[in-house]
Image (cartoon, rainbow, N blue to C red):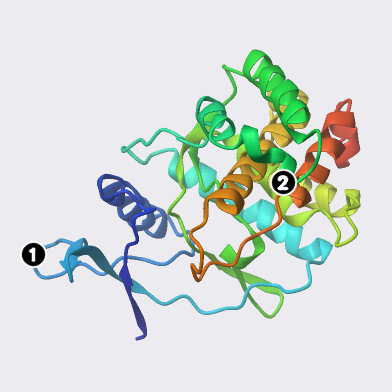
Amino acid sequence: GTFILTLYEKRVASEDLPYFLGLMDHLAGKGIACPTPIHGRDGKALRELCGRPAAVIGFLKGLWPRRIEPHHCALLGEAMAKMHLAGGSFAMTRENDLSVAGWRPLFEACCKRTHEIEEGLEGIMEDELARLEKSWPVDLPTGVIHADLFPDNVFFLGERLSGLIDFYFACNDFLAYDLAICFNAWCFEGDGSFNVTKARRLLTGYGGVRPLDKSEIEALPLLACGGAMRFLLTRLYDWLHHPEGAMVSLKDPREYLGKLRFHQQVKDASSYGLDEAS
């Protein structure tokens, strides 16, 4: 077989690696297509190489979709719901350090330079952050989420989804928050418009495996604002703090400002193609 030797960078905390590797093992054991760590004769998957944590991971066949079609979103929803159900019996937990409690420190590290990106951005973000902190849900169904299911982390072989990769932001949080992140990552077009057909297919694919409850459906607009804020903040932080000459491909934070503005106007889940009565 083909394997990938992974040397972990500083952005992945070494104390979190047993959770990430254990989760991949657990999900694979439940029939979820994802890369699996290779264990040595001593039973261990986590090693050290050149002074850094390392693991050998099985290779997953497939390509990520360069052009997102509605059927990709339907298959993603189905795979995500299966992953959420499979994660229900995973014993380890990891708090989401990039959820609502982690946003203000990021904002405070950036807020005095936000004008370099867009005039007035500090006020927009301050107001929205205060609203999210005040209104963020506390009692939605929780479990293991991927938290970074962008198109380049979802592989397809022909017309079928062949696997999910890159579990290094996985954590325990609201299951519906994973959907909200995917609204932003999968359902906007290049011109910034929201494609409700893609969102509907994502939600119906998901709901066919794990139906959302009423509280989750009602929370979707708020969760989508939170998902937009999370990536707006991390992109903003990276944009303003990257070292000169670093070989990093920076992503424009303004893309996520546009997505945030869209979700701020949403009144209920019907804007995402979901009938509240369903």
**Residue at image x 62%, y 40%?**
233
The reply to whether residue 103 is in sight is: yes
Identify whether 256 is placed above or below 250. above
* Identity, as a three-letter code, of the amino acid under mark 2: Glu
Which residue bears the numbered disc 2? 116
Identify the secondary structure beneath mark 1: loop
Which residue bears the numbered disc 1? 42
The reply to whether residue 148 is in sight is: no
**Residue at image x 70%, y 60%?**
75
Identify whether 128 is placed above or below 115. above
Query: In the image, residue 255 lies at what x, y percent?
Result: 77, 51
| Of 255 and 28, the residue lying toward us | 255
Identify whether 121 is placed above or below 75. above
Query: In the image, residue 72 lies at what x, y percent?
Result: 74, 64
Give the residue furthest to the top.
Answer: 134
Question: What is the spatial separation of the Cα atoms under label 1 and label 2, in whole angstroms?
Answer: 52 Å
The mark that comes first in sequence, 1 or 2, is: 1
Query: In the image, residue 235 lies at what x, y percent?
Result: 62, 49
Badge 1 vs badge 2, beta-carbon distance below 8 Å: no
